[in-house]
Image (cartoon, rainbow, N blue to C red):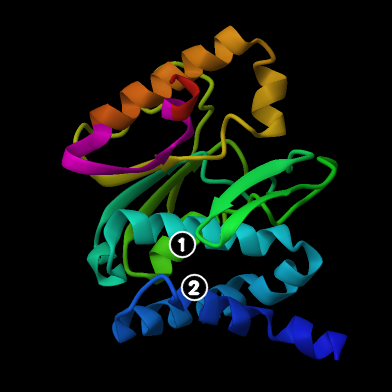
Amino acid sequence: MKVLLSSNKKDRLITKLSRLWKDQQDHMLIEKTILALNKHYDLNRKMVKEPGVEGIIEQMVGRLANSFGSLSNLQNKRILDIACGSNSSKAPASLYLNTPFGRMSVGRSSRGYTALFEPWFCRILFELGATPVGVDFGDLELEVFTHYRVDLGRINSLDFLPEHSFDAVQDSRLFGSPEFTAQFPDQADRLNVAQEIRRQELRILIMDGIIIHSDANELLK
């Protein structure tokens, strides 16, 4: 029975996420997306091994529901994910998630690989027909979406991105990552980076562009 329940985690996730929309087309799109994530990235196994992965997916999809309404509105939207996560990231001992289905704290030892910080948001956007661009310092070599390896702690590191070239942007993984905290242990330095990230977000967004989520803005409040 335990094996059967584990094998059905992706199906239960599809049912749960479908509650965020009323339109049948959105239900079909979210099912297609979760099945694709499972096929290409072994999502079901990773959710079984690290239950926090399910919360990550719920949080990311919930942000899309809040920002775009219908999933069809994401078609061809150019969206930047700053600190998108990678295939070499470590997870903090504790990670706070605010999902449409409740708040939770997940985490594990920061030693070694974790699926929690894989680039799930860009993968979701790609499967939904958007044009995601991910930037991160970690390994993104085999990812199908456009990506750049960038040291986000460096001032002007995103200047290579043209002004007003994105429909939406988010940053949500930089300031809590073990790598960033080790690089910038001083709060004043982290605030300087947050100011730079906020400046870049406003620079690259089109007029009426959407900030899906910004930890930089939250940090500077």
Q: In this view, does 94 lie to the left or right of 61?
A: right
C-beta proximity under 8 Å, tags 2 and 1: yes
Q: Overall secondary structure of the magenta stretch?
A: strand
- Which quadrant of the rendered structure holds the N terminus? bottom right
Q: Is residue 19 left or right of residue 2?
A: left
- Which quadrant of the rendered structure holds the C terminus? top left
Label 1 secondary element: helix
Residue situated in front as seen by the camera: 193 or 152: 193
Residue found 54% across the figure and 27% down from its top: 151
Badge 2 is on which residue?
17
Give above or below for 111 relative to 54: above
User: Disc 1 residue type?
Assistant: Val
User: Where residue 217 sits: x, y (%)?
Assistant: 41, 27
What stretch of residues is rendered in magenta?
204-217
User: Where residue 52 sits: x, y (%)?
Assistant: 70, 58
- What's the distance in space between the residues labelled 2 and 1, CA to CA? 8 Å
Q: Is residue 101 left or right of residue 61?
A: right
Badge 1 is on which residue?
61
User: Disc 2 residue type?
Assistant: Leu
Residue found 25% across the figure and 66% down from its top: 75
